[in-house]
Image (cartoon, rainbow, N blue to C red):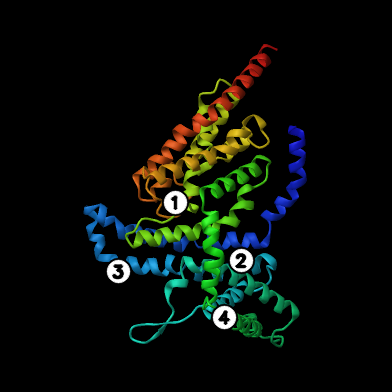
Amino acid sequence: MKAKISHLFDRLSPFFDKMGNSPYLKAISGAMMATLGPVLIGSIAVLLMILPASLPFLSFLGDFSDLFVKLNTVTIGAMALYVVVLMAYQLVRNLDEHEDGISAGIISLLCFLIITPLGITTDEVAAIPTTWLGAPGVFSAMFVGLVSARLYLGIKRKGWTIKMPEGVPPMVTKVFESILPTILIGLVFILISSLFEMTSFGNMHEFVYTIIQKPLQGIGGSIGAVILISLIQQILWFFGIHGTNVVMPIVTALWMAMDVENLNAVAAGQTPPNITGLAFFNIITWGGMALGLVLLMLRAKSKQFREVGKVSIVPALFGITEPVIFGTPLVLNFRLAVPFITNNSIALLLAYLLTKSGLVAHFSGVQAIFGLPIGFHAAVQGSISIILLQLFIQLILSPLLWYPWFKAMDNETYRLEQEAEKE
């Protein structure tokens, strides 16, 4: 049976490798990851806005509330603007590294603004409402970025550009080469915008948010979907396929949009509406819950596992678990397959239930910083209950979940070591 399963995944491996190397998935993943800088700044601004209410000795931060609101508005509140530029840039660079990704990003931003309806201030001044610049406009930004990038490449490959004579500086040549693609792609999105204005939705943003983004958040943000994603990711890892590269690009945009909704709610003094999200997933599944296995190895009877534990313990305390994953190894190790595949899902379900019951605070949506040690990694959510939850999962639950499976393998390895010494 093991051989048959392994053979099946050997045959499926090229498919998953192709998915992981898909220029579109890599563009989505790269674009969303590149927004972490602005999102982190906005997240810190939100935390500094709410801290004076709970910590009186930080009341002086209230004097800077206008600054924090501004930082939140131009980072988290403008996330779609960053996404639309980065999406086009990443896709163009992935499909043709010799093409000008910057021009594609600027064209994409233009198209996004074309489909964004203008509003009128109380002083009767035309203005762009922030409604579609934040989380509600993220999926529109993804669509515009990917489509405009493909159109840009198609036009360039057709040669529909203004040709400059030899000797003209490359910078000037690039500017003129992008003029015709800008006009043509802009006309396409003017047409798209006009067509949506004739519908009951009024604009493309409303259509994408209502028909695509909101239903996907309801489905993909459910605990059942989160657990399913976790299981698929770990199964792929078990068979030596980079599960994170295959799975996470599909859900990162969706979960990050949910985190931004949470941050906006926190900034407004409200309870975050979403229990799950990217921050929830990353903090709960920190290090793949392999720290528990490392802790057990430090007390193992087998010399082999004790050595692996000694080498792995320090990196594991910072969420870096490659030494134990490849030192054990966990890949294709059917004796540890059950905990390796299911531990994350068990932790996610427990965390969801504790949050749903109110024993643990809702995650604020602040993106966790990779490389921070255990506890500090969860502290960015601004709640002691979330810190305690991570410590409990990693230091108590994880060793318990690994124990019966590892104990049996440790005893067997120790017996073989003893027999080898006698020979």
Q: Is residue 34 left or right of residue 175?
A: left
How far is the residue under mark 1 from the one under mark 2? 30 Å
- 1 and 2 marks in contact (CB < 8 Å): no
Quadrant for the C terminus, please.
top right
Q: Amino acid at mark 1?
A: Ile
Q: Earlier in the sequence, mark 4 or mark 3?
A: 3
What residue does disc 3 label? 66
How far is the residue under mark 4 from the one under mark 2? 24 Å
Point out the frontmost of discs 1 and 2: 1
What residue does disc 4 label? 193
Q: Earlier in the sequence, mark 4 or mark 2?
A: 2
Q: Secondary structure at mark 3?
A: helix
What residue does disc 2 label? 90
Using the image, tell me which numbered label, if any, was put on residue 275.
Answer: 1
Q: Amino acid at mark 3?
A: Asp
Q: Earlier in the sequence, mark 1 or mark 2?
A: 2
Measured as percent of width and height from the top left, residue 232 is found at: 62, 45
